[in-house]
Image: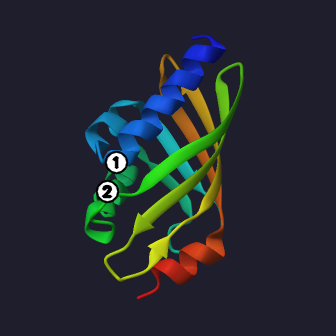
Amino acid sequence: MGIESNKELVTNFWRAFSEGKYEEVLGLLTEDATWWVAGTTALSGTYSKPEFAKLLGQVTPMAPKGLRVTPKLLTAEGDRVSVEAESYAEFSNGRTYQNIYHFMMVIRAGKFCAVREYLDTEHVTVTFAP
């Protein structure tokens, strides 16, 4: 795939994610895909595709109106797309989740094989706290 088609794939991924189309999101991941989240929070660490699917299953109960992730800047080179993004969600616990991110998304054969997610982990800790 070329650089522009890689960027389009990223845009389509985050559109589907923001619309709550998680089966479509999972369909854009290779079977051996990994999703790594920075930090030392309860959400931090490396997820396999099945583990990431389980994590996605927790989004709707936590954010009934959805979790919107909006890419702000895409930079692509080779099989990688760097994404600066912002999110917004109203949580069922009454808190507003509004984070900033850098995603490094690696593509193989038209799907994502690795994603590295960097975000404000303190905001995660405060917002996700019981």
Q: Residue 103 location in percent, x, y?
A: 63, 45
The image quadrant where one finds the C terminus is bottom left
Q: Amino acid at mark 1?
A: Pro
- SS label for mark 2: helix
The answer to whether residue 67 is left or right of residue 58 is right
- SS label for mark 1: helix
Q: Residue at x 52, y 22 (%)?
A: 8
Q: Amino acid at mark 2?
A: Lys
Q: Residue 3 location in percent, x, y?
A: 65, 16
Q: Residue 12 location in percent, x, y?
A: 44, 30
Q: Residue 84 location in percent, x, y?
A: 67, 45
Q: Which residue is mark 1?
A: 50
Q: Residue at x 28, y 58 (%)?
A: 57
Q: Residues within 10 Å of mark 2 (few under 14, many from 20)?
A: few
Query: How many numbered circles does the render carry?
Result: 2
Q: Is residue 88 visible?
A: yes
Q: Are marks 1 and 2 in contact (CB under 8 Å)?
A: yes
Q: Which residue is mark 2?
A: 54
Q: Residue at x 61, y 16 (%)?
A: 4
